[in-house]
Image: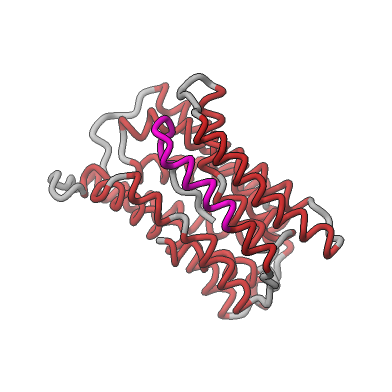
Amino acid sequence: MALIWGTNYSIVKAAFREIDPQAFNALRLMIASAVFLAIIGVLQLRPLRAAGGVATVFQTPTRLTRRDLAELIGLGIVGHFLYQYFFIGGLARTTVANSSLMLAATPVVIGLMSAAFGQERVGPRHWAGAALSMLGIYLVVGHDVSLHGRGITGDLMMVAAVLCWAAYTLGARRLVSRHSPVGVTGLSMAIGTLIYVPVMWPHLRAVRWGAISASAWLSVAYSAIFAFVVAYTIWYAAVRQIGSARTSVYSNIIPLVAMATAVMFLGERFGLTHAVGAAAVLAGVALTRTAPAVRPAEPCEP
């Protein structure tokens, strides 16, 4: 899972050289939603026995209520339409290092938002982790802005993406406790895609699809099938088998894989400031995840 999501940053960013970012995203969302819905449909028509935790990962034991449907629509808008718009737009305008580190800090934001809504209490350890993570992000982002003089539009879009995913994670807790996590993900993604594609239709029409290389098409397929369907399934299966706390530890590897891949294949620079900033972000996230009041976050797909 960590390898898939970590390498996905560079694979997606490389494809932007040939495909408009939002058109790329619309295409991969359509493919992933179709695969998710097919899996959900097959498993609901052919129920599996609850053996080895498979049924709890894939299948929904209860029917959808009107409240469930309303929440799914909200999750689709926030967690897939808005999140994907900001994530792809941000990744296209900033570096892989900045993108992956800001998304790595999502558990910190989830904890703070959860405390703001009165769902959980935030202790000193979580505040210390939040401060350390924010310092790490400032070191990396601020260093890049001052050194290269580039704009911060992409970084701000990534901040918006983190906020959207944090809201999605908190909003999905009740649904995931009642329904299959993969089902909630697939249905909310399909709803978000139904909104995303019409809005991004001008981007889709502007692409010269016949001129797209085979490698770019492979990037679309990889990002849709592996980064969405396969990695999500691995995440939820792992949560079932080894618990959410142990599973979430592996997500700390994602920014390390992302930055290493970007250096090797995209030629991005990675200096001492990036290393110190990355260490601060990951140490801060580790503090928040060991704090007893804060639950591990849902995966934040790149």
Residue at 68% across / 52% down in the picture?
201
x, y (%) of residue 145? 81, 57
User: Picture coordinates of residue 82 (x, y %)?
Assistant: 62, 42
Quarter of image, res 147: bottom right
At x 68%, y 70%, the residue is 271
Would you say 135 lies left or right of 67 here? right
3 to the left or right of 16: left
Give the position of the N terminus as an image quadrant. bottom left
Where 113 falls versus 225 (above or below)?
Answer: above
Q: Please say whether residue 224 is visible from this viewpoint.
A: no
Q: Nearer the viewer, residue 49 or 254?
A: 254
282, above or below 174, in the image? below
Residue 261 or residue 225, whichever sits in front = 261
How many marks on residues?
A: 0
Residue at image position (29%, 29%) is: 63
- Residue at point 63% right, 71% down? 15
Q: Is residue 263 visible?
A: yes
Quarter of image, res 192:
top right
The one nearer the camera, 50 or 199, is 50
Dominant SS in magenta: helix
Task: Tell me, yes or no, whether the highlighted magenta stretch contains residue 69.
Answer: no
On-image quarter of the C terminus: bottom right
| Viewer-proximal residue among 219 and 200 | 219
Question: Which stretch is magenta?
Answer: 279-296
Outermost right residue: 149
Q: x, y (%) of residue 233?
A: 34, 54
Is 197 situated left or right of 52 in this image? Answer: right
Residue 159: give x, y in percent of width and height: 67, 44
